[in-house]
Image (cartoon, rainbow, N blue to C red):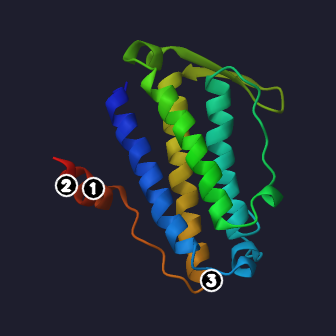
């Protein structure tokens, strides 16, 4: 099992990378932000909302709540995305602080909207979420390039050297 401390570092990295990408998005016009570009999700906005949604859905599940679904229409600007995502981050950080290694190793059962149910150790679901976020961050970088904006460097190695090493 991967130690909980590693996951806390990866979540810190996740939100650091998010903030850097949102800074790059802030320079776009509202039209650019919502422009259909033909990726996994229609626009840069829709991709970012999907990332917020993923963190909400998993956190709700881990806390035993029914997931609340978000509508991209409720996120007209980058500022609104940032505000909502920061709120989700706060909730997720509080949740992570309440975990210990034994809780992280316990089984977690998830029922998908299709009715399919599966069980895996809780830590694997966190790894899935973090991997999911990295996957779509790559799409955000591509979408920024398509819109003529420069995507920031958000590699984990860059984060470790720039942020983590500076804290030591």
**Residue where numbered disc 2 is placed:** 166
Q: Is residue 44 left or right of residue 168?
A: right
Q: Which mark is residue 84?
A: none
Residue to which mark 1 is pinned: 163
User: Distance of mark 1 from mark 2, alpha carbons?
Assistant: 5 Å
137 over 62 or under it: above or below: below
* For the residues bearing labels 1 and 3, Cβ distance under 8 angstroms: no
Where residue 147 is drawn, which disc sits there? Answer: 3
Quadrant of the snapshot with the N terminus: top left
- Residue at left 63%, top 34%? 58
- How crowded pointer 1 is (Cα within 10 Å; few <14, some 14-19, many 20+) is rated as some
Query: SS for tag 3?
Result: loop
Give the mark, 3 or 2, whose residue is nearer the N terminus: 3
Residue in view at x 58 percent, y 73 percent: 26
Residue 6, quarter of picture: top left
Q: Is residue 1 depicted above or below 35 in this figure? A: above
* Mark earlier in primary sequence (1, 3): 3
The residue furthest bottom is 148
Q: Secondary structure at mark 2?
A: helix
The answer to whether mark 1 and mark 2 are in CB contact below 8 A is yes
Mark 1 or mark 3, which is nearer to you?
Answer: 1
């Amino acid at each position: 099992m991967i130690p909980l401390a590693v996951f806390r570092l990866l979540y810190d990295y996740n939100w650091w990378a998010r903030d850097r990408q949102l800074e790059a998005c802030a320079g776009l016009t509202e039209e650019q932000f919502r422009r259909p570009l033909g990726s996994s999700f229609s626009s840069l906005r829709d991709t970012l909302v999907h990332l917020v949604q993923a963190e909400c859905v998993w956190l709700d599940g881990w806390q035993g709540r029914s997931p609340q679904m978000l509508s991209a229409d409720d996120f007209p600007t980058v500022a609104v995305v940032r505000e909502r995502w920061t709120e989700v981050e706060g909730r997720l950080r509080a949740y992570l602080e309440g975990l210990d290694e034994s809780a992280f190793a316990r089984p977690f059962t998830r029922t998908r909207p299709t009715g399919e149910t599966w069980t895996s150790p809780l830590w694997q679901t966190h790894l899935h979420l973090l991997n999911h976020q990295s996957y779509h961050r790559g799409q955000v970088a591509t979408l920024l390039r398509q819109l003529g904006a420069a995507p920031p460097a958000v590699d984990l190695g860059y984060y470790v050297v720039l942020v983590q090493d500076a804290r030591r």
